[in-house]
Image (cartoon, rainbow, N blue to C red):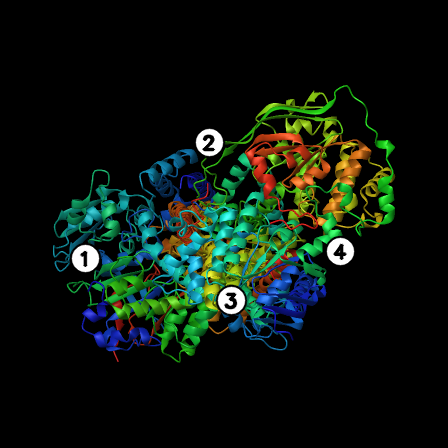
């Protein structure tokens, strides 16, 4: 955990410098349409932007230390509040996207690894490569066009829930979980329907690395000495495939999942934009365009923390699955 | 056999794309920048196989001409991150210790960013130019090169031939440069090829949110972004063709990278 | 009410329970009759217009939930669309008003029916507190108040509970209209003061999230970045009762999604629809969606030439460019016909005070070349044309067409797309863009008001750095002058004449403000503030 | 088809499909095993001995194809049998154990569970008594504290323990045939013997048939009843053990026996003919090379090592995985080399023997000055070379005087350098020969000296055989006329016949060039052939020093005694158990 501190500090510094280097002048932007020079200066003072960068940086870090991540200029809300409210939306999307990808990619990878070099292998490979070659924004747009606009099968691509619903009362922030807790099947289905297109868009993108890694790891495991031993002892095919080969192959796949997860969180910036998803990605784009310093910094910082959390979680899972982890000298 | 077929197909596709990149402007049937206010938003036809856009420009010509820009962005970004990344990575992998720690931290810090957002931030901060897209793409790719190069170097650090070179009194830096580095190249080539596709997607993504190439230059991402607004009104060809071109190019690089990986590392495939 | 959808709690469970499974929401469904769903590009960021950093979309909140002393009337245009009437001022909180003979004192009688949401009557003290706040907090509100010659709190006098006075340093035709813009809204000062602190005497933190007004609507829900919901104030008595009970304003960043939602009937009203969509949406839906729009008063889409940069200091160069703009193509490809041409005027001398009016230029490359020769630049030159990424919908095609056309007279143009955040700094504050597209529109519909902002040196929207002593004098003289003044017409014609001649800003067209709405939605009017005034909207049930 | 044998393999042929076309792996191989019999299959790498075993048990991988022959097990036809039947037989009737036992066990499953998997699969136990049976098996393979070990994972066990677990798994269902594929390769000699003894004991008790596949003739002679010798996919000879050693029939068998060093064999005995070298090369070898005559020097000892210590910091890595996140280290030191002193005379060869981890490799790295010692002196040719750091040492002329031959000939050659490039490297760097003609001349001469045909000089390592690569490595090491050559297990990766040739070459070079050798090896028998004196190391310390033959015949220390007695060896005409 301690090792992450320098990285987080690096992230804070880089994001600070980067936001200050943004060409937009928030004072001008937020002074309003008809503001004159004088009122712009007033806004600048009010935002503390008249101080030097160094001064601003120390104020920022000091505030961070007190848990104050600042206030988003664009939405007028505290950044932490905004992020906490939006994070579940992004996570819900990413988790389900990742889940879909895993559900599709792992069997594909296993299938390919058990028949290496066969046409099944090649089809899997083509399919998966095609998935990663699709620009997410492009996929999203065409899915909307076809399934919402032309066919009318999916609900309007408007965020997490149809406008007519109020969100379920906040427990986890995940609508599909909260609605079940509240026992409201209708909202659950509504939220689920909203999730289908964006998660498919994301999932397609995540397919390739997972399938590729599954295939590689399975190939390695299947040609390993211990699988040979298992076969020499006549263990059943399913036992060999699942208990022996796959459980071992799942270790590198799990590590890849961590990577893919953080990667998806970043990549769903575009998906959120296309689907009007009220997540932290779309929040970040708008903040960046508006030179909304605190919001951009808060976003980057929260992503870095999330990244570390995800890796930590994966380490814990690895330690549970793999007895070698954590015990080595 | 079919494995070779895939590689052959993707390689010929690659040649085709490179060909378009080199000679696109001579192949394009129309001037990609010429507007025609009387001939806007025409669906695909014989005269305009990919239709025309909102200013009456020929979409086919724009898609063809865009190849060069997209390729050169991806190529220069990848080249840049390859040079810097492999230098840093091999230093970290070869000497380890503090070098490794500092370079590792640096790479960790980049990785801790959501990469696409970092690229957005860099382009937004430095300005909306092609060069800055290249820099941004190179920076976010850097950790991957550092990682591969470091790993490949550190497994060779203790190789017998490195020890033998030491016995010849060759200086460490020359051992790294002449004995170790050339041997890390094949896996790096795989990384490069896989990265090309990603770099193209990245540049297109930046263009899509408006942080990319300047108008009126044709670029696939920006064309999809512009075309996106027309999809609902039924003018699907504006976004579809550049999007498909983008996809095919990325697809081709990914397949090629896969094929290269098999060549370089046949053990990974049976 | 809490987690169930609210329609259900209102007793229309049957309709709502099947909603998610339908292809689209049946707008005509009984339950939705008094609910209006609006889609907008941008969300609001504050419920308090006086607060620093409050964005443009937030203006509509002020319009709908707060009242002002007076408001503009509404007129019917030739095509049947409704639009505000800049010439007609109607009472709102003020029952009546008088202007002293010297024109320097305005006295308002307050309508006893004006009541805040908490039931307390609106008093002159509330109005004074609110106006004091508007001029004291600085920023945009202060600037706008200044346009009406209101700058200091001591100009506002609460004579008694029901009488409010404004003292002016000199009479001005702009004061009364300026009271009808969104800025001078009336806050429940008792509530606000109770939340004020020593550090924050104007209760900006409280009012930012908790409005305290008397308006026809209240905000019942606000999810920043997603949506907010109005609910009708049933006790409002300062005008006809609003036709809808509830309005959901949903933020949808993508224009094509907004259009799709409207076309499919998932949204009732789509404000600020791009010209192309407004042209197509009616026929596409077979009349299920209609478009209502009007040219935006006192607003022009212009190509601005910055006189600080050579060779734009040369009048011949500016005129040459004015002759080289492909006006017709732009109107077709960028405005899709939804614009009033501002070219092809007959005479270099204006014949009326009408504003905006077509400038006496048209696409004439020969003439442009001649002028360029005369300017001593027969070979042309190179320059950069900047435009705003946020307004790329019309500015990008316009810029591309201009680029192409100018190339024909030898002017090589590089295009520079500037993100919205940097745009204002670059174009308006630093005024460092040599050639750029601009779209200023004045809230108060007088030509001299436009000139005040866009042609006076140093003023915000004079991004051309245009400086002409005669214009300075003319604007100063005319700005507060009544329209009926004898010199008014002469001065304004002269101003326009100078603008024709000097063309620091080359007008291309006057844009329309269009809104698309489902057929049952009526009563939509376009406003100078370009926001939705939901008070007049009605929705027919089927 | 004959049915009298318990296992009968009849004219088995197997082909492999590779990128370079079809390779014949087995050609008409016929073997048979009777009940209770131990059959040894011996041969060098690539002889097809493992393929034979895999084919019998049906584990041939996808690329392999049986083109001919039949296998019958206890009257049951195995060839062409359904996978379901084979899978049922495997583990229950026929089981197999492999080399590298740690890798052959599932790394993330406790060893007890792995035994249970087999028991449950073949219905040899029910859910209720399976654990008891598994623990019982662990007891049978003499794993102490079996109840606790039941929960152990392979990485927590030593290589020998893992092999015992493997044996437990293989024998859990009381099969009737055990195939042991190089079961002790990679284990230390003492462990090797214990493991083999255990296998012998358990299989004898159960009257099992055993096929023991090995490259080690000594081991085959010690544990087998009958031997089959294979070469290039064919059986060249098959006979009872005693007969094979006393009256070998086939020339290959003879060569193999000759090449396997025993406690009494001499270097000259190892080869009678060789196909690795042409006649001309051998002639060349016999000519003394005067041009490399040694300068005489005052000091009788070329090397004096005193109180040499090397400590390593043991890092306690609490694992947290951001890539390369530094590991928090609690400083614990481990002495790899613990205060050793010895000397080496000019022209002398010293053997450095010990099991893995004894510190012999660390010592050789310090002597070659690739590693800095923690303390102690190394006086080389009258000069204390530890006064230079390893980086400084690279710059001084003495650098050329100490060279090394590496263990793995593949790993020690740069894959992108041709043989010529590799050999010229030290000439360019240390002797500053830059001219092409001069370089060529030297390289060709060196190639001749090591018996490397000139036409192979332009080849890359992957185009050379193991023996050829070893020659390139030796040529590189002697190119700069070193005084001291350190040989780090130079033959351990080579087949015995190649090993014999290389040993002879090394011996000849020593004689001709007057170099001193330090020969690092785990194999006392090999060391003895080349070295006058040996030094036995254990845990960083020198246990015993003495003349090679004395140490081998009459070891003084328990450790050495145990080491010597563990070496499986054969004496022609006599069966050793």
| Gap in angstroms between the C-alphas marked 4 and 1 | 109 Å
Q: Secondary structure at mark 3?
A: loop
Is C11 placed above or below A57 here?
A: below
Same chain for mark 3 and mark 4? The answer is yes
Asked if labels 1 and 2 share a chain, the reply is no
Tell me: D425 left or right of C346. Answer: right
**Residue C158 visible to an observer of this rendering:** yes
Q: Do marks 4 and 1 share a chain?
A: no
Location of residue C494 by image quarter:
bottom left
> What chain does badge 4 belong to?
D
Kindly identify which residue carries mark 2.
Answer: D331
- Looking at the image, which is closer to me, C376 or A99? A99
Of tags 2 and 3, the one toward the viewer is 3
Which label sits in the foreground, 1 or 3? 3
Residue A256, above or below B63 = above
Q: Nearer the viewer, residue D297 or C445?
A: D297
Q: Quadrant of residue A57?
A: top left
The disc, 4 or 2, on the residue closer to the chain's N-terminal end is: 4
- Counting from the top left corner in percent of width and height, residue C101 is at 22, 51
Q: CA distance from mark 2 to mark 3?
A: 52 Å
Judge depth for marks 1 and 2 and give the one in front.
2
Say what secondary structure mark 2 lies in.
loop
Q: Which residue is mark 4?
A: D252
Q: Residue at x 69, y 38 (%)?
A: D528
Q: Are marks 2 and 3 on the same chain?
A: yes
Split into 4 quadrants, where in the image is the N terminus of chain D? bottom right
Q: Position of residue B262 (x, y in %)?
A: 63, 59
Query: Given contact means CB atoms under 8 Å apart, are the residues at marks 3 and 4 in contact?
Result: no
- The reply to whether label 1 and label 3 mark residues of one chain is no
Q: Which numbered marker is on residue D93?
A: 3
Q: Which residue is mark 1?
A: C214
The residues bearing labels 3 and 4 have C-alpha atoms spaced at a distance of 34 Å
């Amino acid at each position: 955990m301690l090792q992450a501190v320098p990285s987080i500090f690096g992230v804070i510094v880089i994001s600070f410098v980067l936001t200050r280097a943004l060409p937009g002048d928030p004072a001008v932007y937020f002074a309003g349409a008809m503001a004159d020079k004088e009122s712009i200066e007033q806004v600048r003072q009010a935002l503390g932007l008249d101080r030097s960068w160094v001064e601003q940086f120390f104020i920022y870090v000091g505030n961070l230390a007190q848990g104050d991540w600042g206030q988003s200029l664009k939405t007028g809300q505290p950044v932490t509040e905004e992020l906490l409210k939006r994070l579940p939306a992004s996570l819900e999307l990413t988790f389900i996207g990742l889940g879909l990808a895993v559900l599709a990619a792992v069997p594909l990878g296993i299938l390919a690894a058990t028949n290496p070099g066969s046409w099944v292998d090649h089809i899997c490979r083509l399919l998966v490569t095609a998935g990663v070659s699709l620009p997410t924004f492009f996929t999203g747009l065409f899915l909307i066009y076809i399934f919402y606009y032309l066919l009318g099968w999916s609900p309007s691509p408007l965020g997490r829930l149809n406008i007519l619903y109020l969100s379920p009362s906040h427990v986890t922030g995940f609508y599909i979980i909260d609605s079940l807790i509240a026992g409201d099947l209708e909202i659950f289905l509504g939220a689920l329907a909203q999730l289908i297109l964006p998660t498919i868009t994301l999932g397609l993108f995540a397919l390739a690395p997972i399938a590729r890694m599954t295939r590689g790891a399975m190939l390695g495991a299947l040609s390993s000495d211990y699988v040979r031993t298992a076969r020499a002892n006549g263990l059943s095919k399913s036992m060999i495939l699942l208990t022996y080969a796959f459980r071992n192959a799942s270790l590198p796949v799990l590590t890849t999942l961590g990577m893919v997860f953080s990667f998806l969180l970043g990549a769903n910036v575009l998906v959120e934009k296309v689907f009007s998803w009220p997540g932290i990605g779309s929040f970040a784009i708008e903040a960046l365009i508006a030179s909304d310093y605190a919001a951009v910094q808060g976003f980057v910082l929260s992503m870095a923390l999330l990244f570390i959390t995800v890796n930590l979680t994966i380490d814990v899972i690895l330690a549970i699955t793999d007895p070698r982890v954590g015990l080595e000298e | 056999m079919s494995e070779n077929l895939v590689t052959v197909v993707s390689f010929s596709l690659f040649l085709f794309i490179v060909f378009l990149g080199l000679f696109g402007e001579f192949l394009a049937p129309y001037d990609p920048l010429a507007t025609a206010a009387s001939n806007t938003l025409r669906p695909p036809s014989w005269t305009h196989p990919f239709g025309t856009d909102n200013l009456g420009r020929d979409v086919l010509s724009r898609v063809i001409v865009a190849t060069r820009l997209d390729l050169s962005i991806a190529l220069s970004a990848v080249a840049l991150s390859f040079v810097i990344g492999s230098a840093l990575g091999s230093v970290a992998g070869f000497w380890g210790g503090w070098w490794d720690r500092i370079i590792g931290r640096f790479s960790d810090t980049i990785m801790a960013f959501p990469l696409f957002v970092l690229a957005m931030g860099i382009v937004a901060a430095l300005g909306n130019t092609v060069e800055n897209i290249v820099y941004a793409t190179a920076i976010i790719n850097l950790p991957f090169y550092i990682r591969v190069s470091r790993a490949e170097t550190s497994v060779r650090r203790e190789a017998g031939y490195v020890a033998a070179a030491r016995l010849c009194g060759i200086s460490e830096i020359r051992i790294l440069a002449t004995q170790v580095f050339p041997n890390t190249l094949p896996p790096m080539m795989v990384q490069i090829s896989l990265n090309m596709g990603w770099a193209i997607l990245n540049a297109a993504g930046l263009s899509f949110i408006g942080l990319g190439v300047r108008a009126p230059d044709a670029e696939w991402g920006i064309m999809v972004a512009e075309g996106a607004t027309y999809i609902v009104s039924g003018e699907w060809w504006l976004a579809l063709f550049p999007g498909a071109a983008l996809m095919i190019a990325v697809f081709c690089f990914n397949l090629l990278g896969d094929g290269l990986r098999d060549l370089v590392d046949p053990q990974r495939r049976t | 009410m809490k987690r169930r959808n609210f329609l259900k709690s209102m007793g229309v469970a049957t309709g709502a329970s099947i909603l998610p499974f339908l292809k689209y929401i049946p707008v005509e469904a009984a339950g939705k009759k008094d609910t209006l769903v609006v889609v907008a590009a941008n969300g609001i960021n504050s419920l308090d217009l006086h607060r620093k950093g409050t964005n443009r979309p937030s203006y509509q909140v002020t319009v709908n939930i707060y009242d002002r002393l007076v408001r503009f009337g509404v007129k019917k245009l030739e095509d049947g669309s409704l639009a505000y009437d800049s010439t007609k001022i109607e009472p709102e909180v003020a029952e009546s008003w008088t202007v002293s003979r010297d024109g320097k004192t305005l006295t308002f009688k307050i309508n006893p029916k004006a009541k805040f949401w908490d039931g307390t009557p609106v008093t002159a003290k509330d109005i004074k507190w609110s106006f004091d706040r508007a001029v004291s907090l600085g920023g945009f509100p202060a600037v706008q108040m200044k346009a009406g010659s209101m700058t200091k709190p001591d100009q506002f006098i609460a004579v008694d509970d029901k009488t409010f006075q404004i003292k002016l340093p000199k009479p001005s035709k702009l004061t009364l209209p300026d009271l009808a813009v969104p800025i001078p809204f009336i806050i429940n000062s008792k509530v606000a003061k109770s939340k004020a602190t020593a550090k924050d005497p104007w209760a900006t933190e409280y009012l930012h999230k908790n409005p305290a007004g008397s308006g026809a609507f209240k905000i019942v829900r606000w999810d920043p970045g997603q949506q907010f919901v109005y609910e009708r104030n049933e006790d409002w008595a300062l005008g006809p009762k609003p036709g809808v009970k509830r309005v959901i304003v949903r933020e949808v960043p993508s224009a094509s999604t907004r259009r799709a939602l409207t076309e499919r009937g998932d949204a009732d009203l789509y404000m600020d629809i791009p010209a192309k969509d407004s042209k197509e949406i009616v026929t596409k839906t077979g009349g299920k969606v209609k478009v209502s729009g009007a040219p935006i008063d006192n607003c022009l889409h212009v190509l601005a030439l910055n006189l600080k940069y050579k060779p734009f200091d040369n009048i011949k160069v500016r005129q040459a460019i004015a002759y080289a703009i492909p006006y017709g193509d732009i109107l077709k490809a960028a405005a899709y016909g939804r614009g009033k041409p501002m070219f092809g005027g007959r005479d270099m001398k204006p014949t009326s005070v009408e504003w905006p009016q077509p400038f006496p230029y048209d696409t004439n490359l020969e003439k442009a070349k001649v002028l360029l020769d005369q300017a001593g630049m027969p070979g042309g030159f190179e320059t950069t044309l900047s435009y705003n990424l946020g307004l790329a919908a019309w500015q990008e095609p316009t810029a591309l067409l201009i680029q192409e056309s100018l190339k024909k007279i030898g002017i090589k143009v590089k295009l520079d797309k500037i993100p919205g955040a940097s745009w204002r700094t670059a174009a308006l504050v630093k005024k460092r863009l040599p050639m750029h597209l601009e779209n200023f529109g004045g809230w108060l519909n007088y030509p001299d008001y436009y000139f005040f902002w866009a042609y006076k040196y140093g003023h915000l929207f004079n991004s051309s750095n245009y400086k002409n002593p005669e214009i300075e004098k003319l604007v100063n003289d005319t700005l507060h002058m009544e329209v009926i003044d004898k010199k008014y017409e002469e001065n304004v014609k002269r101003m326009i004449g100078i603008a024709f001649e000097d063309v620091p800003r080359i007008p291309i067209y006057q844009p329309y403000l269009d809104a698309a709405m489902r057929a049952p939605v009526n009563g939509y009017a376009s406003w100078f503030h370009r926001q939705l005034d939901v008070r007049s909207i009605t929705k027919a049930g089927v | 088809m004959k049915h009298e044998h318990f296992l009968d393999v009849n004219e088995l042929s197997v082909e492999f499909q590779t990128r370079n076309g079809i390779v014949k792996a087995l050609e008409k191989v016929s073997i048979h095993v009777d009940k209770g019999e131990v059959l040894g299959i011996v041969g060098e790498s690539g002889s097809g001995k493992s393929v034979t075993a895999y084919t019998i048990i049906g584990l041939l991988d996808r690329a392999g194809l049986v083109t001919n022959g039949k296998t019958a097990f206890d009257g049951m036809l195995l060839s062409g049998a359904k996978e379901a039947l084979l899978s049922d037989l495997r583990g229950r009737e026929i089981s197999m154990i492999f080399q590298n036992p740690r890798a052959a066990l599932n790394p993330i499953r406790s060893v007890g569970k792995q035994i249970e998997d087999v028991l449950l699969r073949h219905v040899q136990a029910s859910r209720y008594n399976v654990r008891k049976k598994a623990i019982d098996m662990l007891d049978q393979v003499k794993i102490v504290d079996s109840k606790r070990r039941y929960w152990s994972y392979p990485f927590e066990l030593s290589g020998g323990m893992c092999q015992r677990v493997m044996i437990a798994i293989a024998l859990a269902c009381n099969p009737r045939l055990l195939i042991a594929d190089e079961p002790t390769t990679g284990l230390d000699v003492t462990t090797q013997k214990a493991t083999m003894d255990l296998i012998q004991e358990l299989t004898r008790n159960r009257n099992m048939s055993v096929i023991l596949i090995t490259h080690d003739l000594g081991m085959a002679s010690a544990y087998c009843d009958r031997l089959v010798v294979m070469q290039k996919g064919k059986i060249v000879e098959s006979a009872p053990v005693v007969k094979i050693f006393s009256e070998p029939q086939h020339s290959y068998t003879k060569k193999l026996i000759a090449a396997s060093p025993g406690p009494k064999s001499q270097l000259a005995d190892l080869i009678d003919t060789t196909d690795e070298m042409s006649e001309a090369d051998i002639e060349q070898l016999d000519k003394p090379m005067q041009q490399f005559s040694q300068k005489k020097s005052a000091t009788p000892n070329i090397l004096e090592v005193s109180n040499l210590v090397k400590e390593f910091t043991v890092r306690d890595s609490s694992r947290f995985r951001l890539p390369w996140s530094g590991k928090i280290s609690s400083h614990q030191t481990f002495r790899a080399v613990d205060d050793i002193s010895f000397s080496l005379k000019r022209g002398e060869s010293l053997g450095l023997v010990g099991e893995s981890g004894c510190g012999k490799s660390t010592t050789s790295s310090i002597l070659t000055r690739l590693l800095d010692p923690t303390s102690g002196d190394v006086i080389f040719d009258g000069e204390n070379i530890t006064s230079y750091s390893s980086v400084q040492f690279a710059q001084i002329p003495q650098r050329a005087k100490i060279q090394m031959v590496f263990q793995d000939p593949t790993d020690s050659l740069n894959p992108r350098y041709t043989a010529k490039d590799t050999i010229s490297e030290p000439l360019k760097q240390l002797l500053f020969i830059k001219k092409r003609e001069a370089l060529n001349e030297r390289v060709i001469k060196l190639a001749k000296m090591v018996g490397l045909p000139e036409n192979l000089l332009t080849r890359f390592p992957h185009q050379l055989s193991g023996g050829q690569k070893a020659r390139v490595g030796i040529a590189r090491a002697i190119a700069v006329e070193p005084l001291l050559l350190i040989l780090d297990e130079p033959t351990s990766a080579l087949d015995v016949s190649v090993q014999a040739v290389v040993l002879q070459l090394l011996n000849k070079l020593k004689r001709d060039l007057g170099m001193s050798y330090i020969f690092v090896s785990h194999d006392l028998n090999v060391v003895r052939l080349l070295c006058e004196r040996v030094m036995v190391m254990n845990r960083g310390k020198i246990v015993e020093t003495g003349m090679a033959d004395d140490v081998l015949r009459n070891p003084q220390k328990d450790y050495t005694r145990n080491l010597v007695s563990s070496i499986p060896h054969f004496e022609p005409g006599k069966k050793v158990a």
